[in-house]
Image (cartoon, grey):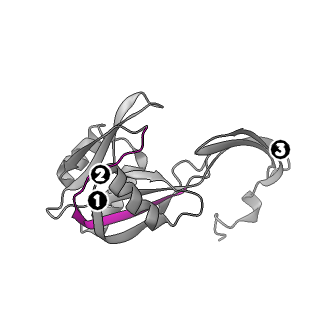
Amino acid sequence: MLDPILDPIMEEIPLESQRVYEGRILNLRVDTVRLPSGGTALREIVEHRGAVAIVPILADGRVVLVRQFRYAVGQISLEIPAGTLEPTEDPLACARRELEEETGYQAASWEQLGSIWPTPGYSTEEIILFIARDLTPGLARPEFDETLSLATMSWSEIWEAIEGGRLRDAKSIVALTWAARRLGGG
């Protein structure tokens, strides 16, 4: 049986690419591709340089989350700290920077959980997920366009927030699930 990830019969071959927008954190291009059937189709692609997301664990086992207004969905979102990689930036360096900027915490212990493609149907974004432990509190320094408030939650409160629809951010749900499994169930 062929591995579907490597199956050349399923590949789409790029024929033409047109960049239609260049922004501060993302670009948009429209590609014409040759389909495995021989036909052609358009693919709208959001180019994103990648991001990190961090599950900060306090000494008592609670998790530090951030609340912020997300304009795209018009609501306050409960999430783990996260941020976009700068060009050529090391993911761990970015994670350290984002944790301190958004929460004020610094971590002495870091563990990479893995990475995810949050929306591979139209975006190149890859998010690298970390657990941060042995936290030392400090002063948060959010970006000029970020208004954040901190929340600390037990694992049971996190699962209730997910199941109750109060925590809907996909990267956070994946990272929290992986972290709970790594830590023995959360």
Q: Which residues are the magenta region?
A: 126-144
> Does label 1 or label 3 sit earlier along the sequence?
3
- Where residue 28 sits, quadrant-wise, is top right
* Residue positioned 29% across, 51% down in the render: 103
Between the C-alphas of marks 2 and 1, the distance is 9 Å
**Front in this rendered view, residue 138 or 173:** 138
Give the structural element (helix, strand or loop) at label 2.
helix
Residue at (75% x, 64% y) in the render: 8
CA distance for labels 2 and 3:
47 Å
Q: Nearer the viewer's eye, disc 1 or disc 3? A: 1
> Total number of numbered labels?
3
Q: Which residue is mark 3?
A: 40
Q: Residues within 10 Å of mark 1 (few under 14, many from 20)?
A: many
Query: Reading the chain from its start, which is encountered first: label 2 or label 1?
Result: 1
Q: Quadrant of the N terminus?
A: bottom right
Q: Quadrant of residue 88?
A: bottom right
